Image: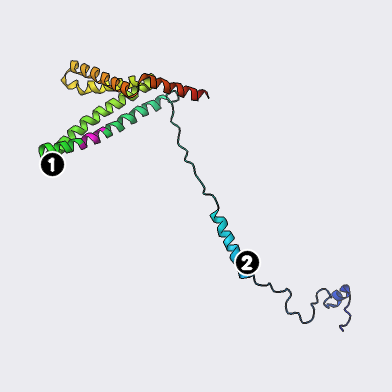
Amino acid sequence: SLPPMPSPALALVLGAPSRQRLSPPGAGHCCPRRRPMPAFATTDTMLAFFWSKKEEPPVVVEEVKPKKKSLEEMTPTDKIVEVGVVGISSFLNGAILGGVFGLISGAWASRSVNGAFAEMQTNGKSWGTISGIYAGSQCLAKVVRGVDDRYNNSIGACAAGGFFSLSSGPQAALQGCVSFAVFSYLIDMLISPPGEKKNELDDASLLKAK
C-alpha cells in the first residue's frame, strides 16, 4: 500500500507533489490515445461532401440593360447626339454596301482591277451620302416633331431625293424630293397600314395605364 500523502497546504510548503498532481503508477501518457477513424466513415463523409456540392443550384447573373430614353426624356444634347450617330452610322453602312456592289459590278463590266476599284469608290460615296442624308433627316424630323411616324420617313426620303437630283438643277431637285417622299409614304402604307398602327398605339396606352 502507498504511504499517506500530506495535505495540499503542507505539500506546497514542503515542495512535495500533491495527490491531485500525481498520476497512477505505471501510466505512460497523460491522455488516452485516439482510436483511428474507420475507413468507411471517411469515405462516406467525402461522398456526402461532393454530393452536396453537385446539388448546389447554379448562380444566374442577370444582365441589366440600360433603358433607352424616350423623346420626352431626351435633352437637346441627347437629340443632337442621336441625329449625329444615326447619320454617321447610316453613311458607313451605305458606303460599305455601295462599295461592295460597285466592286462586283465594276469587275464584271470592266474586267480590270482599276475599273473595279473606281466603280467601288463612286458607288460607295453616292450610296453612303444618300443613306446618311435619309437617316439623318428622318431622325432630325423625329426629334424636332417629337413624334415617330411615317411622315418622318417621307421627310428623310424627300431630303435624299432632292440631294440626289440637285446636280441637275433646282427643278430636278424638287421633283426628286416629291417623288422620293411619295414613294416612301406608299411603301410605309403597304408595310404598316393605319389601322395596325392605331392598334399598336392603343395596346401601348393600355399597358401604360395598367
The local secondary structure at tag 1 comes to: helix
Q: Is residue 4 above or below residue 118?
A: below
Q: Which mark is residue 41?
A: 2
Point out residue 134 in the picture as x, y percentages from the top left corner: 28, 25
First reached walking from the N terminus: tag 2 or tag 1: 2
Q: Residue at x 11, y 36 (%)?
A: 109
Point out residue 6 in the picture as x, y percentages from the top left corner: 88, 77
Q: Judge from the rendering whether residue 120 lies leftward or rightward of residue 25; answer left or right.
A: left
Q: Residue furthest bottom?
A: 1
As rendered, which of 39 and 3 lies closer to the eye? 39
Q: Is residue 194 above or below residue 44?
A: above
Point out residue 66 in the picture as x, y percentages from the top left corner: 45, 35
Bin the neighbour count of mark 1 within 10 Å (Cα to Cα): few under 14, some 14-19, many 20 and up: few
Q: Identify the amino acid type marked 1.
A: Val
Q: Which segment is the magenta one?
A: 94-100
| Figure quadrant of the N terminus | bottom right
As rendered, which of 37 and 141 lies closer to the eye? 37
Q: Judge from the rendering whether residue 207 lies leftward or rightward of residue 195; answer left or right.
A: right
Q: Is residue 42 one of those drawn in magenta? A: no
Q: Name the image colouring.
A: rainbow
Q: Quadrant of residue 10?
A: bottom right
Q: Quadrant of residue 115?
A: top left
Q: Residue at x 53, y 55 (%)?
A: 54
Q: Is residue 147 visible?
A: no
Q: Judge from the rendering whether residue 164 lies leftward or rightward of residue 20; answer left or right.
A: left
State the separation of the CA atoms marked 2 and 1.
80 Å
The local secondary structure at tag 2 comes to: helix
Q: Main secondary structure of the magenta part?
A: helix
To which residue does mark 1 refer?
113
Q: Identify the amino acid type marked 2.
A: Ala
